[in-house]
Image: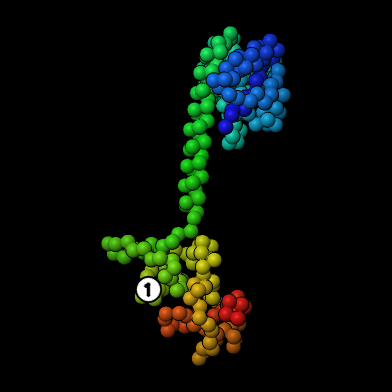
Amino acid sequence: MIPRIFIVDDEAPARARLRTLLSDIAAQYPHQLVGEADQAQSALNGIVMTRPDIVLLDVQMPGMSGIELAAHLANAAAGAPLVIFVTAYDEFALKAFEVHALDYLLKPVRAERLAEALRRAGNLRARLQSQQEAIAAASTALHAKRRHFSVQERDRLLLVPVADVIYLKAELKYVTVRTKVREYLIEESLLSIEEEFGAEFVRVHRNTLVARDAIVGVERGSSASEGDGENDRAQDAWQIILRDIDERLPISRRQWPVVKVLVR
């Protein structure tokens, strides 16, 4: 990506000199000059509007100094431009780096020295972008749905495929994970599992999630199901018929309309 550059200097000849230098090094360092300003306040407005990658900034200006402007930029949100100071005063170098300036160039600036500073800025931008992409990728992976539940049993860790799970039932501080073969216990909340796997599982009771593709049908139970805080009457006696296992699971009054749609 071609870097976008913004010039801030209160002296018109100094801005013209920087434009000339940028033109001279355009072949070896392609760029886009997106704007310039003669004082810090107008520079702030221009930087917000043009969103440059690099600001070539003078130190001594009327009103707000370049050091103060750089501090404002450094405290801004992510995406703040890199700052390269271009000044006739060497005594502000320490303060410049305190506000995270990338480089400090003394006037009159040579084209080679400006090109070197811009190359450093380009390399830093590339590293920052790479880091941001890595963080974004890690965040995506972190929030991606799992394909297995982790089960800790004594001195071993088992991975239970989500696709094998028929239902999950909350019991005390554990959640029972039921497959065709056996049951497992995991220490997760049923709510967080439902949020992560809402497309694969449906809540049939306040303490039970059932795999949607494991539901074969429903039938009347011999007795009413356990309550879920409501008045449980006849339709609470409906139970889920599951594939691969003979066990039946009660459907609460609250969840009956949802389940009825699935088996209709």
* In-image side of 48 versus 207 (left or right): right
Rendered image quadrant of residue 37: top right
Give the residue at x 50% y 50%. 140
For image coordinates 41% across by 62% down, the residue present is 148
**Quadrant containing the N terminus in the rendered view:** top right
Q: What is the count of numbered marks?
A: 1
Please report the residue visible at 44 percent of the width from the left and 68 percent of the height from the top. Answer: 163
Work out whether 118 lies above or below 259: above
How far from the left and from the top, in percent, is residue 136? 51, 45
Vertical placement of 53 versus 11: above or below?
below
Mark 1 Cα shell of 10 Å, populated few (<14), some (14-19), many (≥20): few
Residue at the front extreme of this rendering: 27
Quadrant location of residue 36?
top right
| Amino acid type of the residue that numbered disc 1 sits on in the rendered structure | Glu
Question: With 99 as the anchor, is 146 left or right in this view?
Answer: left
Residue located farthest toward the bottom when viewing the structure as drawn: 222
- State left or right for residue 55 relative to residue 246: right
Q: Quadrant of the C terminus?
A: bottom right
Q: Residue 148, relative to residue 130: is it above or below?
A: below
Q: Position of residue 161 (x, y in %)?
A: 40, 65
- At a point 53% along the width and 84% down the height, the residue shown is 218
Residue 21 in the image: above or below residue 228: above
Is residue 174 something that shows in the picture? yes
- Give 116 or 66, whichever is nearer the viewer: 116
SS label for mark 1:
strand
**Residue 98 is at least partly visible in this image:** no
User: What residue does disc 1 label?
Assistant: 183
The percent position of residue 29, horizontal first and vertical second, equals 55, 22
Q: Residue 16: x, y in percent? A: 67, 13
Front-lying residue, 192 or 47: 47
Q: Quadrant of residue 34?
A: top right
